[in-house]
Every structure is written in structure tokens, then in C-alpha cells.
């Protein structure tokens, strides 16, 4: 039997506090309220949804999630722009088209993101969640088996209490990072984007997302509702610095070197620097903990190339609601459940799902980047080729006091373990075997070798001659 909200009356005491009201947080709140309306839920959202947001292409299958959340019709009424597919100049100069017409769920969408996020949050509110906008999560302390949260709203401190906390603050994972949870960061991708207002009479070739590879990364552009257009340049932080791409002129010059994307320059110009947004693929080292879980980008972020970020946020928001429900019900069951003794609890199952999903994503991402082979020597593409060139007999040694860059495909503690295995010069294949022995199942040989290669490239490891 699930108890009703124990804190009714005091708006600052809720069963579940959802930190962050983006797609992941709003979907979690919507699904929680749908799942069990007796729980009190508050969404704590720093913004007021007025500023423009990045991330706008929605694949057709998202329809099923919006239907599940009960907001499909409201979404249709909100005036987003149907998208009929993707055009990709990837692997060759020749663009090829992937039409959504063959997709069982029909068309995809180009969103006004701020409007989309605001709609989801407003629907959660209609469903009975509290929505605290302009309210930023600052700090947390354990309190009475749950959490005490320090928030800031309209310049004032606000204290709230919750039995359970959902970290949906996006890739910064503000709550999890406060709990000192580390991140596995897989690359150094950044997005430099600009929105353009098109003239009323502009006739652009339509409603496809255009993706185009170039030597330093790739570009995407998409038409948005209200005669707007977004253009983004994706590259690694060091290449962006080397090419000075954060500034308007070099960004426009780089755009002019593309074969397809440059065509938008005939319709519009740019009078300010592009906006920079981190876009690394990353995974929290733990996506659940004591009375909390992370969802959406806070838990794991995907390369925008996948166009899966919003879908994943909604999908895992729904799973998160099930996991929380399972967890809170388990807390209330004082009698041991013999039948379920060996069943992992909802939070553990949820964590496994997130991790498996991330592993599958990394494989798909590697395959997709490998399809582009025109610039094998360019740093951006070489880093993504995932090719092994390390001689298994090469002797490796870790350098004293070398600072790690934190951009490897493993947790910091596992990278440190790898480095400690190289305190004395050792052959690469021996290091892999010893790591597998100490940490069975954590990573494939392939992944460990890639990490060794990265550490060698960045200078954390050096080649050495074996001890006599
Ligand atoms: C350049 C780029 C292009 C992209 N393109 C696409 C695309 O085409 N399609 C796609 O599906 N995905 C795309 N993505 C990814 C997509 O935007 C994200 O995956 C998605 O926004 C994740 O949703 P979320 O709710 O987890 O996080 P977010 O959307 O980041 O939402 C987090 C929310 O938390 C709030 N918040 C943050 N900190 C606090 C705090 N301390 N207190 C209170 N509130 C806080 C924020 O205001 C925000 O509302 C793109 C990403 C990038 C970088």
C-alpha cells in the first residue's frame, strides 16, 4: 500500500523533488504523477523558459513517448515544424537522403525548443506537480532519510525537503556532482551554433535536417518554426581554439568552405559570435544513489549526431518514474518479501538500463563515424576512428605527477588503476591482462587499449625500456 503524500500542507515538503525542468525532468514528473497521483512532486527549474534553447530535431518514434505521457495532441497544437528526413553529406560530397516517409511513426519534427520544454513542464503542472521557475538548486544535505535542498529563487534562499531527488539538471548534473560522483568523458566535442531569422519570402529547400562532414568535424542545419534556422558547427575544443571558431568571422569562413551548408549564406548573414555549447559524450560513474537518481543528460549525454538526446530524456524519464515508484514502495514495505529477495531493486535495474543504453550508443557512434573516411589524418576523425595501433609489446610507464585530462572512456578511478599498473615499465598486453584480472567485465580489451593509446598520446604514459 502506498502512503499518500505525507507533507500535504507545506509546499516546501514534497515526496519527490525533480531538479531541472527540461525534457527529462518534465517527463519524469509527468510519468510520476500519472503513475501515482498520491505522490507530491515539485519541479525546480532555474529558467523561465524564455531564452532560446539548442537541440531541435525530434525523430518520428518520439511520438510514442508523447502519447504515453498523454501530451501528443498538445504537442501537435503547439505549432512545431514537421520534418521529412535527414540529408547527409557523410562519407562523400554527394548528399544522400533518409526519408521519414518510410518510418512507421511518420514524420519527425523541428522544434522551437524553449516552447517544447515549457509545454512539457506546464503539462506536468496541470497534472498536479508544482513548478518552481526561476529557482536554482544550490546545495543538498541528508535529512531525515531524505534530502534537504538549498535553492535560490528571485534572489532569496528557499529551503525544501524531499524524500527522493531526481537530478535532471542536464549535462552539468548539478546534484550528482555535489555528491562527488565522477564522469566518464569520451571526447571533447563542442557545438558552436547560431540562430538566423529568415525573411518572410525565403524559400529554402525544406524541412530536412542537413548534416555535412568537413575536415574539422561536421555541420548541421535545420529550419525551425517561425521562419528561423539553426546552423551548428561541431568540432573538438582544441581544433576550435586552433581555428578561432568561437568568433563570427572565422566561423563564417569555415562555413563558406562547406559544399552544402554554405548555401544558407545566400539567404542570411550573422552579426554576432556563435554560441558555444559543450557536446561531449559522457556517463555519470553512478546514475543512482541513496534516495536519488539522475536522468536525461545528467545521467548520460549523446553526440548530437544521434539526434537522440530528447528521445532518451523522455524515454528514461518514464523509466525513472517506474524506478522511483518501485524504490519508494519498497521502502514502505516493512515485511521482507521472500519471493523478491534476489530481485535487484528498481534503482539498480534503472542504473543497468542507463549503462547498457550508453554502451550500445558508443558502439553505434563508432560505426557511424567510421563511415566517414575522407580525412583519416585529421585529428577530429583520427580520434573517432577507434583504430588500434598500439604495439602489444610496447613497454609503457606512467609519468610521476602527470595530471590526467579526464577525457577517456573510463572512470577516473579505473584510469588511475591503469596508470598504477604502469608504475614499472610493462608491455601493453600485460597491462591489459592485469587490468582485466583486477576489474573483470568493466571494459573490453578494445576499450582498454584505446584508453592506453589516449594516455600515451596525451603524455600521461610514456614508452620505456624494460627494467634489466
Ligand atoms: C549542439 C547540440 C545540438 C543538439 N541537437 C539535438 C537534436 O537535434 N535532437 C535531440 O534530440 N537532441 C539534441 N541535443 C541534445 C539535447 O538537447 C539534450 O539531450 C536534451 O536537452 C536533454 O534534456 P535534459 O532534460 O536531460 O537536459 P536539458 O535540456 O539540459 O535540461 C536541463 C534543465 O535543468 C535546468 N537546470 C540546470 N541547472 C539547474 C539548477 N542548478 N537548478 C535548477 N534547474 C537547473 C535547465 O535550466 C534546464 O531546463 C543537442 C545538444 C547539443 C549540445
Image (tube, rainbow, N blue to C red):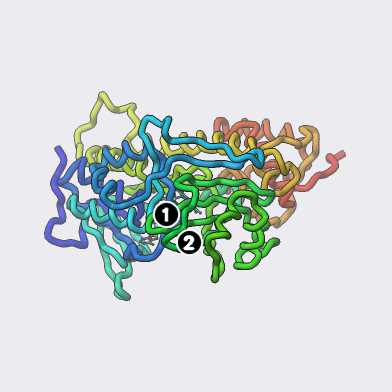
Secondary structure category for the residue under label 1: strand
Disc number placed over residue 224 in the picture, else none: 1
Q: Are marks 2 and 1 in contact (CB under 8 Å)?
A: yes
Residue 423 position within the rendered picture, expressed as x and y whole percent measured from the top left: 73, 45
Secondary structure category for the residue under label 2: strand
Residue 426 position within the rendered picture, expressed as x and y whole percent measured from the top left: 77, 38
Q: Residue at x 73, y 32 (%)?
A: 429
Disc number placed over residue 195 in the picture, else none: 2
Q: Residue at x 55, y 65 (%)?
A: 269
Left or right of 190? Residue 153 is: left
Nearest to N terminus: mark 2 or mark 1: 2
Q: Is residue 19 above or below residue 432?
A: below
Question: Ligand 1 within 8 A of label 2's CB?
Answer: no
Circle 2 Cα neighbour tier, 10 Å, few/some/many (<14 / 14–19 / ≥20): some
Q: Is residue 114 above or below residue 38?
A: below
Residue 282 position within the rendered picture, expressed as x and y whole percent measured from the top left: 52, 47
**Which of the two residues, 19 or 3, is positioned nearer the viewer here?**
19
Outermost residue, bottom side: 155
Q: Can residue 19 be seen from the camera position used here?
A: no
Q: Assign ligand 1 to one image quadrant.
A: bottom left
Q: Residue at x 70, y 43 (%)?
A: 382
**Which of the two residues, 16 or 114, is positioned nearer the viewer here?**
114
Amino acid at each position: 500500500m502506498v502512503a499518500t503524500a505525507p507533507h500535504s500542507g507545506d509546499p516546501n515538503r514534497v515526496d519527490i523533488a525533480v531538479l531541472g525542468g527540461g525534457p527529462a525532468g518534465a517527463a519524469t514528473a509527468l510519468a510520476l504523477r500519472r503513475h501515482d497521483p498520491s505522490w507530491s512532486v515539485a519541479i525546480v527549474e532555474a529558467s523561465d523558459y524564455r531564452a532560446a534553447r539548442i537541440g531541435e530535431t525530434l525523430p518520428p518514434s518520439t511520438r510514442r513517448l508523447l502519447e504515453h505521457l498523454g501530451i501528443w495532441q498538445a504537442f501537435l497544437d503547439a505549432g512545431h515544424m514537421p520534418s521529412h528526413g535527414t540529408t547527409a553529406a557523410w562519407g562523400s560530397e554527394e548528399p544522400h537522403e533518409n526519408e521519414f516517409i518510410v518510418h512507421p511513426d511518420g514524420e519527425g519534427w523541428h522544434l522551437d525548443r524553449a516552447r517544447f520544454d515549457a509545454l512539457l513542464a506546464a503539462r506536468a503542472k496541470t497534472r498536479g506537480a508544482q513548478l518552481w521557475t526561476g529557482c536554482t538548486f544550490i546545495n543538498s544535505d541528508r535529512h531525515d532519510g531524505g534530502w534537504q535542498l538549498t535553492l535560490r529563487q528571485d534572489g532569496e534562499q528557499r529551503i525544501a525537503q524531499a524524500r527522493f531527488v531526481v537530478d535532471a539538471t542536464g549535462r552539468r548534473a548539478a546534484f550528482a556532482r555535489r555528491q562527488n560522483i565522477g564522469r566518464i568523458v569520451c571526447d571533447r566535442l563542442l557545438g558552436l551554433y547560431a540562430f538566423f531569422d529568415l525573411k518572410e519570402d525565403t524559400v529554402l529547400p525544406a524541412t530536412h535536417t542537413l548534416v555535412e562532414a568537413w575536415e574539422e568535424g561536421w555541420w548541421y542545419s535545420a529550419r525551425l518554426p517561425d521562419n528561423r534556422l539553426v546552423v551548428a558547427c561541431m568540432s573538438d575544443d582544441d581544433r576550435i581554439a586552433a581555428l578561432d571558431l568561437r568568433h563570427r568571422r572565422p566561423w563564417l569562413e569555415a562555413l563558406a568552405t562547406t559544399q552544402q551548408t554554405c548555401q544558407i549564406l545566400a539567404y542570411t548573414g550573422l552579426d554576432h559570435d556563435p554560441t558555444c555549447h559543450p557536446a561531449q559524450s559522457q556517463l555519470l560513474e553512478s546514475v543512482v544513489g541513496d534516495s536519488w537518481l539522475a536522468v536525461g543528460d545528467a545521467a548520460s549525454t549523446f553526440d548530437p549526431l544521434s539526434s537522440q538526446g530528447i528521445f532518451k530524456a523522455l524515454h528514461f524519464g518514464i523509466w525513472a518514474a517506474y524506478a522511483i515508484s518501485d524504490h519508494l514502495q519498497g521502502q514502505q514495505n516493512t515485511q521482507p518479501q521472500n519471493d523478491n529477495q534476489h530481485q535487484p531493486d528498481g534503482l539498480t535495474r534503472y542504473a543497468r538500463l542507463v549503462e547498457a543504453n550508453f554502451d550500445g550508443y558508443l558502439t553505434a557512434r563508432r560505426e557511424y563515424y567510421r563511415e566517414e573516411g575522407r580525412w583519416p589524418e585529421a585529428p577530429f576523425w583520427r580520434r573517432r576512428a577507434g583504430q588500434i595501433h598500439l604495439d602489444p609489446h610496447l613497454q609503457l610507464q606512467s609519468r610521476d605527477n602527470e595530471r590526467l585530462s579526464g577525457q577517456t572512456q573510463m572512470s577516473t578511478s579505473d584510469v588511475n588503476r591503469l596508470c598504477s599498473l604502469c608504475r614499472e615499465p610493462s608491455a601493453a598486453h600485460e597491462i591489459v591482462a592485469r587490468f582485466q584480472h583486477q576489474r573483470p567485465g568493466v571494459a573490453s580489451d578494445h576499450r582498454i587499449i584505446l584508453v592506453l593509446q589516449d594516455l600515451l598520446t596525451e603524455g600521461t604514459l610514456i614508452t620505456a625500456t624494460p627494467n634489466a
